[in-house]
Amino acid sequence: MALPEDVVQRANVDVRVLLRTGQLQEAKELLGKRLELPPQLVATHRESELLAAFVYTLLGEGKDAWYAAQHGIQRGLREKSVFIEAVGYIRKAHALLLMEYSDYQGACHAYEKALTLMNTINISRVKAEPYMGLAIVKHMLGDMEAAKKYLALGLQETEQVQDAWMTALILLAEVKINVSQHETAQAKELLIKAQQLFQECGDRNGLMHVLFYQSVIAFQEKSIEQFQSLFQQFPQSCMTNGYHYFLQKKMILGPSNQMIFYELLQYSQQCGSEEHAAIVGLRQFLQAEDSMSYSHDEIQLQLFGSVSLIRGQRKLEDKEWQRDKAKELFVYLYCHRHRFTPKEEIAQALWPERSVESLDRDFKVVLNTLLKVLEPQRHARQDSLFIQRKNNMYQLQHISFLQIDVERFHYYFHLGMEEFDPELSNEWLQLALASYTDALYAEKKQLDWLTQDREKLQYLYIEVLERLAQNATRQQQYKKTIGYAERMVREDPLWEEGYRLLMYSHYQLQNRSLALKWYEKCVQQLQQELNTTPMESTMAVYDLIMG
């Protein structure tokens, strides 16, 4: 007997069925329609937001998941519902893992906050989800012992309530971790269980994940026959079911590094036999090039402060760079990443004192050194994935695979500046602030060609501090305003908005004398450095203080 339509809608039964059978786009569309209706007309509006956050998570849509989760948290606080707030934090944590530049510490904190809230109301039925998330985070942070502990806790919860689908998701999380550690025997056993559970639930998305990991294991074990069969089925499942997002976005239960898709395609080619149409389609979809070498190692590059590279979990020692000029060359290519740069221009910037004859030789040596650092597995005649050559010009490519701290800063800067709500804006801006640890390539202060890019980033950094200070003022948190504004004027003693915020905040805290001291300092700096007087807006704050 079918349930009445209003019951189906009120409990989001239809959405849950779509979710648990891998029809994620359909679930998203249905929730979208429901959330467009006025809240008073939809009894389940509050639940739909949190369900939408989970659907966005499984689609790899981190930013949308984050906003849906934040609305859930705010609703939980408004309605004094600890349960809604806790689920909001779980979904927010998932979202932080899916951002272009994952915030592992933030995700860890949000999962733990959710568990703390659940303990206060003695609810354990949804604890499996944060346990699964914590296992993934701890694994990404290199804490395998904690990862295994949380997996066990998650499975204990799902088995108690006999939730086969959630059990299968946690088994996938365990497989993800095992595969990254090359523990293939255990991963294969877990995949058999997960496959059986997903088949019972009719979840095609789950089964596609299983095929993916089975392909990776066959690749790791160099089992050609198995690989060819499985790797044919995986792209077929992706394309037939419209799961293209699995190949394009970070997925909570997908690979830690998307470079693996290119590695699998490369191995498929090495296996020799004629490729199935689905694999050819995957190659075209990913624009994979036969002439390139792809490495599964995740690379992180730090350009703020001193230049460093982390491959996997290991930071390269300075001697592995062989020469400082290799770092300089990378930074130069990064600063000019939007165009092909002639070799002569690069060489003259890096060696302004050298003769033309020696420039060519020096450039070749340093370029080869940099290529060995970025792509140690690359053969001499293979094209570089990261540095593309066109005639005698070079350009940095595929920087999304390099996880560069400056890119992370830009990413969170834009999210924070575009957000009007001060509380939400602050969360993004704090992540931008954490990325900016020092000036760009600060250890090489004397490089003339770097001055403009360094100053541009410093300007953006001060803008972050300014917005954080303005947000704090809007929230009447004047002590916080003072902290940010002091950092602004330390960074640039001529940044007038910093003085205005200091004057206004001290005045609001009933400290007129300190407010006036900051005004006097502003007047003095402007007179000394620019031979000018404060702007009208600064004088308006001064007049307010003077009454």
Image (cartoon, grey):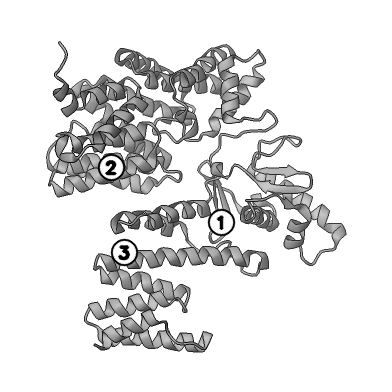
Three-letter code for the amino acid on which mark 1 is drawn: Leu
| Image location of residue 213, percent across then percent down | 46, 23
Residue 85's image quarter?
A: top left
Q: Quadrant of the C terminus?
A: bottom left
Q: What residue would you read off at disc 3?
A: 471
Q: What residue would you read off at disc 1?
A: 303
Residue 166 appears anywhere in the view: yes
Three-letter code for the amino acid on which mark 2 is drawn: Ala
| Of the image marks 3 and 2, the number of the one nearer the N terminus | 2
What is the CA distance from the residue labelled 3 to the residue labelled 1?
28 Å
Q: Secondary structure at mark 1?
A: loop
Label 1 CA crowd tier, 10 Å (few <14, some 14–19, many 20+): many
Q: Secondary structure at mark 2?
A: helix
Q: What residue would you read off at disc 2?
A: 69
- Taking the image as shown, residue 166 lies to the left or right of residue 160, namely right
Label 3 CA crowd tier, 10 Å (few <14, some 14–19, many 20+): many
Three-letter code for the amino acid on which mark 3 is drawn: Asn
What is the CA distance from the residue labelled 3 to the residue labelled 2?
21 Å
Residue 191's image quarter?
A: top left
Q: Secondary structure at mark 3?
A: helix
Up/down of 386 relative to 15, above or below: below
Q: Quadrant of the N terminus?
A: top left
